Amino acid sequence: MAATATLASGNAPIKAEYLISSKAVEIVDDDAAEGSTNPATSEQADLSKRELEEDGEDDPPAKRQKLSGSQKRKLAKEERKAKRGQNKGRRFKKAHDEVNLCWNAGRGMKCEKNDCRFSHDLKGYLDTKVADIRIPHKEELLAHPPFASIPAEVPDDHIPREGVFCPEFRELGECRYAFKCRFLAGHSEPVLDGEEDPLGVGLRLLYDAEQAALAKNKFQELNRLTSAGLLKDLRTRKYPTPKADEYLAYLATQREEPLAAAEPEAPTARISSADDNVSDPQRTNGDQSSLGERVETPERRTKHEEPQDTSDVPLRPVEKPRLHWKGMTYLAPLTTVGNLPFRRLCVDYGADITCGEMGLAASFLNASREEWSLVRRHPSEGIFGNQLAGNKATTVVAAAEVISQECPNLDFVDLNCGCPIDLVYKNGAGSALLDAPTKLGKMITGMNRVLGDIPVTIKVRTGVKDGRNNAHRLMPRLHNWGVSAVTIHGRTRQQRYTKLADWNYIKECVDVLRASEAEEGSSPIPIFGGGDAYSSQGYWESVESSGVDGVMVARGALIKPWIFTEIKERREWDISSRERLDSIRQLCEYGLTHWGTDTAGVNTTRRYVCEALSFQHRYIPLGLLERPIGVLNERAPAYRGRDELETLLASADSKKWVEISSIFLGPPPDHWDFQPKHRSNSTSEEANG
């Protein structure tokens, strides 16, 4: 009997010969797993979470409100729903060498510090150092166990060995981690008898001057923190932001006018969840349309006019470089997984435009190293932008000015107006800005002033609540605000990822924007859609039916990074298991050059490779399907692949992901365990095969 006859509706139509069971594996809940994302783990977000906790939680029992039985059951249900599908408070064990060697000593240099607390015994360090790693080459990968003809771990003697290479040395001509590198055999040579051995370890480091010169333009990461004292100046509020100060001073004068009270900023704790049956404090009489009509009046539009030109005249929006993005492929800013190594991989497959992970404006100004790492760019990223999120013009505009000064290699800055997670929305940022167009206009106008010739783009959702789409009301105002490009995710904040994207509404937004441009005689700005881009056919159907200039690809790229090749070549790629494994090998190499080739860097790379595999295991090979195009929301029953490697790559067991990473990174440290966002992947019960 054909597989399609035995599988329930909504299940992927896998051919009968590959089925293990017709019962669908537990569906992965992206909504729940994304409840804890990068901003939510930051110090500021933790503080916001504490501020958002229900009043009276810490009160003595006598003062707490007594709940009825039905109220208790309802609360328990909500708590279970909040915890469903995600692992709360993930922690990853840091890996260290047995001997904590001084950085300078590890580079064969003398340490100038008299009070250095690290070891300077290089020979003792090498005697206890964990074995080097040998990354299998592409041609050594196998479709059956052990999946590589030569194991990753090599004998612990640190001598030059056939096939061993250091990814960083190969790209940069030198390795910053020197003797601490886990690929030391790839950039060292033995000191011969009779030769001078100043370090007394029998090895000398290699340096490739020709490759180092080439790497300056081809491989050296851009937008690294170079200004001395930048973080200190930010922490002590001494970093100058004259353009932002001027603009914010202008806004302050406008607040004195009666018009400024028309749309007050709601206190953080008062902004309701999209799932609550409470009207938003910024909505008038519960009527969403009244808000859109109110802000469109000419009197209120004057609030967004820029201050008079000064001696330091910023570029007007019309003077910004136009973005010619039509027909280009666009990788969405992706939390956690959308890091620089993953973006490099997507660029290899054909991504034209990339954007860093969402960063909180307040965290940039508070000198968060984690936030500042999000702006790093690889030279291979042809068009690269940074995404900001914030709830006030004071922080967003100031952060934009600092970023423009410190990160010269940015092609655009994107303002996030679509993030649905509670800790962002309830603070008035992300998708909450859709219901605060006056505040949004102030942010965009201010960003344009301080960013110079760097264009400002925005990413929005269709609206906040189901049935109350309002993104189309913003379209006629984009040119006045100076928006250079816009992306519309075809879901409301309330829908999150649970329903298919509404491409009919995206088309409506496109039509409204193009009509306003024709009426004003302004140049068209690129407009991208977003949602459910999982195949080349689906991508181009969405483009042709909606009139967008392109589709921003998010989960489709997480599940199969090679989707950009499919889009460019307008074909569906039945990629082999060995090709997929080689893609993971490349991601490992990119991770090592970014996070480091020492023990800590190897382990960080392992963590983020497993993060990528937590999505890639969902890919169902085309050759296993009854029909050629899979659908993103179809659930996969338990199945086996066409070979053992394909079966392994389909496993939903997080321990298998660690096993896959070990093919290239060697065995993980003792007691190290990967904790996936999706709780259903924490055990092997649903693993395929």
Image (spheres, rainbow, N blue to C red):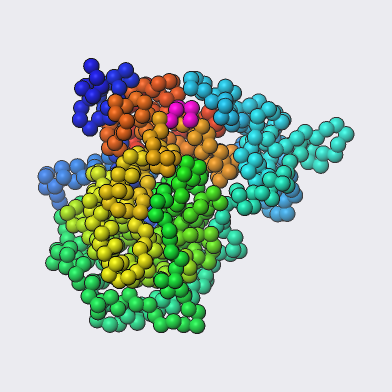
Residue at horizontal 68 percent and vertical 35 percent from the top: 186
Is residue 494 visible in the rendered image? The answer is: no
Residue 574 x, y percent position in the rendering: 40, 30
In this rendered view, identify the residue nearer to me: 623 or 37. Answer: 623
- 442 relative to 55, above or below: below
Residue at horizontal 56 percent and vertical 29 percent from the top: 138
Residue 7 covered by magenta stretch:
no
The stretch of residues the image draws in magenta is 575-579
Point out the residue furthest to the right here: 194
In this rendered view, identify the residue nearer to me: 167 or 542. Answer: 542
Left or right: 303, with 280 as reference point: right
- 139 relative to 249, above or below: above
In this rendered view, identify the residue nearer to me: 275 or 503. Answer: 503
- 90 relative to 450, above or below: above
Residue at horizontal 15 percent and vertical 51 percent from the top: 66
Residue 526 x, y percent position in the rendering: 37, 58
Could you say which quadrant of the image residue 278 lies in?
A: bottom left
SS assignment for the magenta stretch, majority: helix
Residue 175 x, y percent position in the rendering: 66, 44
The N terminus, quarter of image: top left
Residue 578 covered by magenta stretch:
yes
